[in-house]
Image (tube, rainbow, N blue to C red):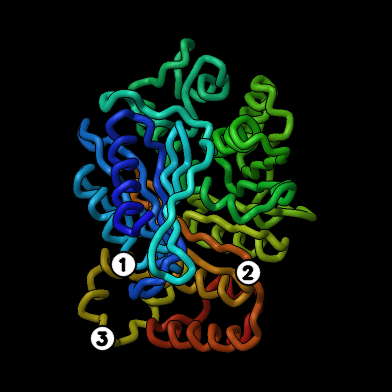
Amino acid sequence: MSTTTSLQEFETAINSSLIDGTFLKLSLGNYKGPEKDLKNIYVRVIQVKRANKLSFTYRYKTRDIVKNYSYEEGVALVMTQIVNGFAMSTLFTSKMDLSLVQKRDGLGYELITKPASLNLQPSLSHNKEKVRLVNADIQKKYLHELNITDAKGEVFKNAQDKYKQINQYISLLSPLLQNFKDQELQHVVDMGSGKGYLTFAFYDYLINVLKLNTRVTGVEYRPDLVELCNRIAVNSGFNGLRFQEGTIQDYEAERIDLLIALHACDTATDDAIFKGITAGARLIVVAPCCHKQIRREMTASKVKNELSYITKYGIFLERQAEMVTDGIRALILNYFGYETKVMEFVSGVHTPKNVLVVGIKQREDDAKKLEVLEKIKAAKAYFGIGHHYLERLFNLPS
């Protein structure tokens, strides 16, 4: 089969799956093109103002960028990206998986067809609601007891944003779970679990969708919420889910495979990262909140630099302090051998605290550690920072 024919057949298959409603997703990988740090592109169907779009997630080494296109624009862009450097592209449909693979000599492509690997139901109509990883139904008692759904399993109107946030959270964590092999994800800890909306949903996804034998622990300071959540867990038959009263600082566990801390206030996020690193967590996911410690340091020092014309304004100083705080957190994760990503957690419409910092455990590198320490030192000097709380927890050389 010629290169042109293979490309045309792959493009035709994409268009056909979009038309007949069997399209599930599309992934482009094994990138050998010129764009620096680009690794993959993932494509899925979303609804924007009742119109179906193709949503592209451009995955770079340290960040993700999401852009939406019409079907026609999106398919054309996919084919352009393929010829510009992606050696492996796979279309997932409810009928089959179709891969377009560049030949070893780089002089053409071949098509490989396999049985469908995804057990998902595609939307058969452009007007149907998009597929949710956590579906609301009458069987999910925890959604009803948390006042997300009514007795019939329908989402309350005033809970729509929370329901969307839950699904966005699961959709972000889902691809990160690929970092675990079978039996490696034994214990998940959610630090500062609050009322447990996201903790329950994630446990539901792990156990009932992925069919994993995983324990999940929610750590929460407020005893009334711990009591409530444990009662709901029992009522829902979630035997591997428990909530424990206490602070992040005081929590101890021999093993943590995945640590999550969403909107832990100020240095509580650092306490969570510290617990995750010291417990050897393979994956650390935090959504920081209330970056007070570094802002106080920057305000007190009043250092002058090229950004002073911006940081003289309180709101800009606050935003700069947030980025500096999380930037140094990412560097400290790098120091301990974690590859880091920073991405949007949920839309700013739902919460202004929407940055997600992800650390994926790789291997520690002594040479890289020295480089990271120099970057931290330079950042502190530039912004007039005496210390970063997480830096102090580890007693890093300053």
Disc 2 versus disc 3: nearer the observer: 2
The quarter of the image holding the C terminus is: bottom right
Q: Are marks 2 and 3 in contact (CB under 8 Å)?
A: no
Circle 1 sits on which residue?
A: 84
Question: In whole angstroms, how far apart are the C-alphas of marks 1 and 3?
Answer: 39 Å
Which quadrant: the N terminus? bottom left
- For residue 218, side relative to residue 267 (left or right): right
In the picture shown, does residue 368 fall above or below 13?
below
Q: Considering the numbered disc 1 on the image, is that residue within a helix, a strand or a loop?
A: loop
Residue designated by label 3: 306
- In-front residue for pair 141/79: 79
Image point (63%, 81%), residue name? 396
Q: How far across and how far down the image is residue 237, in percent?
A: 69, 23
| Circle 3 crowding by C-alpha within 10 Å: few under 14, some 14–19, many from 20 | few
Q: Name the residue located 52 percent from the left edge and 60 percent from the top edge.
A: 358
Of residue 282 and residue 76, the one placed in the foreground of this image is 76
Image: 323 above or below 185:
below
